[in-house]
Image (cartoon, coloured by chain):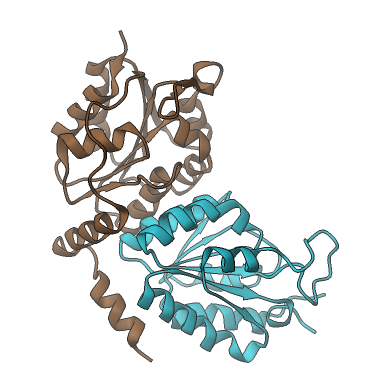
Chain colours: A cyan, B brown
């Protein structure tokens, strides 16, 4: 399996065109090719975090300081960051884009991810809207739509990166 | 004799000029709200372990603005990764003060790990924060805060305090009101574009 640089660039362009300028990241395997695009862009602040919860909290401060933040992580990071997402972002109405690899979904080639994942139903349960990207053509417009809604409604919004929109066939 | 947290917060409140101040969940919230409520205060009353990291985000977003984050021992132990991010990013405009009463006081004075073997200052230094200090007396506290507010590098002050609940009534502001008040204040200072700009951009096709 090979990651697609072209598909990764679409994710970067989606963030860029949506005006995202502050990115927290906990390294995981799907989004690896997206990171160099971000790190090379002087208009984007890149921060590596050691736990998703920390990144989600840092993003609140960045947002209040006028930035347009996103966090890039594996979807399992929802398990490590649900408390602030509910008790700060939802309660205070704080926008944040959650860009998550969708692990355990069709096309996943590992045995060590939870089948079907659990992040999507958890987000549904706590009332955080999310969208599952299925084709590379929808990457840019749907990331822009997610960001449009997250600022209009002042809420966190999730976008799931499936195998189909980041890896080669 | 150890200092009282409320006394330390009072000293700090008297020293504040135009710094952003974040307070973590617990007595420090109600202390600062009663002693010196101001538009640049953010009372992070709804989630434990968020204030320091939110302070990092603010310090990085607003590099010309001094940011002071107030945590407790319980809340910083819950989010030690915040110290890692602070040491990693080195926000030169961030002062983190941990009021360490060696206890989970709000739910009933359970001794915390810092009452036994754990040292928060050492965690901070291990995370790469170079300016760290642990203080026990109010005079030391005041001096270290004065220095930290002038310093041009990230600072961690661990203030060992007695247990003792806040003598003041409950916090009188919720997150949403606090958020809007805070952002309007930053807008007035010309530091951010604020909500109006977002709404405009959100509506743009």
Instruction: In the rendered view, tell whether residue A74 sits above or below residue B75.
Output: below
* Left or right of residue A122, residue A97 in this image: left
Residue B150 seen by the camera: no
The residue sitting at 55% across, 54% down in the picture is A81
The residue sitting at 24% across, 66% down in the picture is B192
Q: Position of residue A53 (x, y in %)?
A: 53, 51
Q: Position of residue A142 (x, y in %)?
A: 53, 85
Q: Position of residue B15 (x, y in %)?
A: 15, 33
**B129 or B9, nearer to the observer:** B9
Instruction: In the rendered view, tell whether residue B137 sits above or below residue A52.
Output: above
Q: Position of residue A21 (x, y in %)?
A: 42, 70
Looking at this view, name the residue that lies furthest to the top. Answer: B1
The residue sitting at 39% across, 50% down in the picture is B54
- Number of callouts in the render? 0
* Quadrant housing residue A139: bottom right
Quadrant showing the N terminus of chain B: top left
The residue sitting at 29% across, 38% down in the picture is B29
Instruction: In the rendered view, tell whether residue A121 sits above or below residue A57.
Output: below
Instruction: In the rendered view, tell whether residue B70 sits above or below residue A5.
Output: above
* Left or right of residue A164, residue B9 in this image: left
**B190 or A128, nearer to the observer:** A128
Residue A85 seen by the camera: yes
* Left or right of residue A116, residue A121 in this image: left
Quadrant showing the C terminus of chain B: bottom left
* Left or right of residue B44, residue A52 in this image: right
């Amino acid at each position: 399996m090979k990651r697609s640089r072209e598909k990764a660039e679409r994710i970067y362009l989606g963030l860029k065109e949506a005006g995202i300028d502050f990115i927290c990241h906990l390294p995981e395997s799907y989004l690896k090719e997206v990171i160099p695009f971000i790190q090379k862009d002087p208009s984007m602040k890149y921060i590596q975090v050691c736990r998703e919860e920390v990144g989600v909290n840092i993003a609140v401060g960045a947002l209040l300081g006028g930035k347009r933040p996103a966090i890039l992580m594996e979807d399992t990071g929802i398990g490590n960051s649900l408390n602030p997402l509910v008790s700060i972002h939802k309660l205070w109405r704080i926008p944040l884009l959650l860009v998550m690899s969708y692990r355990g979904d069709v096309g996943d080639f590992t045995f060590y991810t939870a089948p079907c994942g659990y992040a999507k139903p958890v987000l549904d349960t706590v009332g955080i809207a999310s969208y599952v990207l299925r084709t590379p053509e929808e990457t840019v417009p749907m990331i822009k739509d997610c960001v449009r809604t997250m600022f209009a409604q002042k809420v966190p919004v999730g976008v799931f990166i499936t195998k189909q929109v980041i890896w080669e066939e | 004799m150890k200092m009282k947290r409320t006394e330390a917060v009072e000293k700090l409140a008297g020293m504040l000029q135009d710094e952003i101040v974040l307070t973590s969940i617990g007595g420090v919230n109600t202390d600062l709200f009663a002693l010196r409520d101001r538009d640049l205060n953010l009372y992070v009353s709804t989630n434990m372990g968020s204030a320091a990291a939110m302070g990092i985000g603010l310090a990085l977003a607003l590099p010309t603005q001094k940011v002071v984050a107030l945590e407790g021992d319980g809340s910083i132990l819950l989010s030690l990764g915040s110290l890692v991010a602070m040491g990693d990013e080195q926000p030169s405009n961030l002062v983190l003060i941990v009021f360490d009463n060696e206890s989970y006081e709000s739910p009933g004075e359970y001794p915390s790990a810092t009452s036994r073997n754990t040292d928060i200052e050492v965690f901070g230094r291990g995370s790469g924060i170079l300016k760290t200090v642990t203080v026990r007396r109010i005079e030391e506290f005041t001096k270290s805060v004065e220095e930290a507010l002038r310093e041009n590098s990230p600072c961690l002050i661990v203030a060992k305090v007695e247990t003792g609940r806040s003598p003041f009534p409950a916090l009188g502001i919720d997150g949403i009101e606090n958020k809007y008040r805070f952002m309007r204040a930053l807008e007035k200072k010309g530091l951010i574009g604020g909500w109006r700009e977002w709404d405009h951009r959100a509506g743009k096709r």
